[in-house]
Amino acid sequence: MALLNIRKFPDPALKDPAKPVANIDGGLTNFIESMVQTMYAAPGVGLAAPQVGDSRRVVVLDTDHQNPGKKLLRLINPKVVAAEGSVIWEEGCLSVVDYTADVKRAARVLVRAWTPEEKEIEIEADDLLAVALQHEIDHLDGKLFIDRISRIKRELYRRKLAKLIKEGKADGQRPSSVRI
Ligand code: NI
């Protein structure tokens, strides 16, 4: 199965809000499997369709890379239906090279979604999974975590990225950070 190409900021595909999936078919489930392989290969704990240039509301997540597949989620049209508390988490993203930042999110969320087996499910999440679900659903709305930090921090990142691109070093990732 071919790996998909992960778009990087400032690729305009990352800004497009994705459209709800109206029909789950074989083409979609094959695409979702390609997303899963791409996420593990990256490696990242989550991947949203707009990150691979596809404008459908689909995300995949696995917060436990020690046991790949055990906690794997394939979600179609995911939606946060309840949220409470707040948490600050240092986030990274497969689409944002060489950068992490503290982002404020809800500490606990209840997410409703469809699976490729056409079952409607609810996921109660806290900790990394809660953060990752909100981060991925943001991708579906055309938002990156750097849209949730201060303007000055975002501007400093833009400058840093421009410098890295000029020096030909923009493909490095911080290995220690969790990329969502
Ligand atoms: Ni991301």
Image (tube, rainbow, N blue to C red):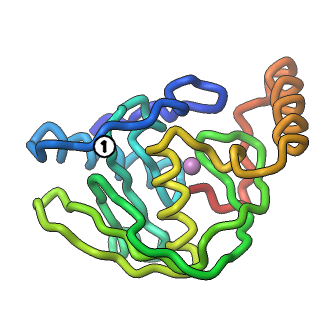
Q: Residue at x 35, y 52 (%)?
A: 36
- 86 in relation to 10, above or below: below
Asked whether, in this view, residue 177 is left or right of residue 80, the answer is right
Could you tell whether 119 is left or right of 127 in the image? left
Question: Vertically, is 88 above or below 154?
Answer: below
Residue name at image x 29 percent, y 75 percent: 122
Residue 111: image quadrant is bottom left
Badge 1: few (under 14), some or many (20 or more) residues near its Cα, within 10 Å?
A: some
Where's residue 129, x and y in %? 50, 73
Decide which of 164, 120 is in the foreground and name it. Answer: 120
Residue at (61% x, 56% y) in the render: 179
- The picture places residue 37, in percent across and down from the top left corner, at 36, 49
Q: Nearer the viewer, residue 39 or 159?
A: 159
Tell me where residue 152 appears, x and y as whole percent: 90, 41
Instruction: Check mark 1 vs ligand 1: CB closer than 8 Å? yes or no.
Output: no
> Is residue 34 shown left or right of residue 99?
left
Instruction: Choose top left, top right, bottom left or bottom right for residue 171.
Output: top right
Amino acid type, callout 1: Ser
Q: Give the residue at mark 1.
A: 34
Question: In which quadrant of the rendered image does the N terminus lie?
Answer: top left
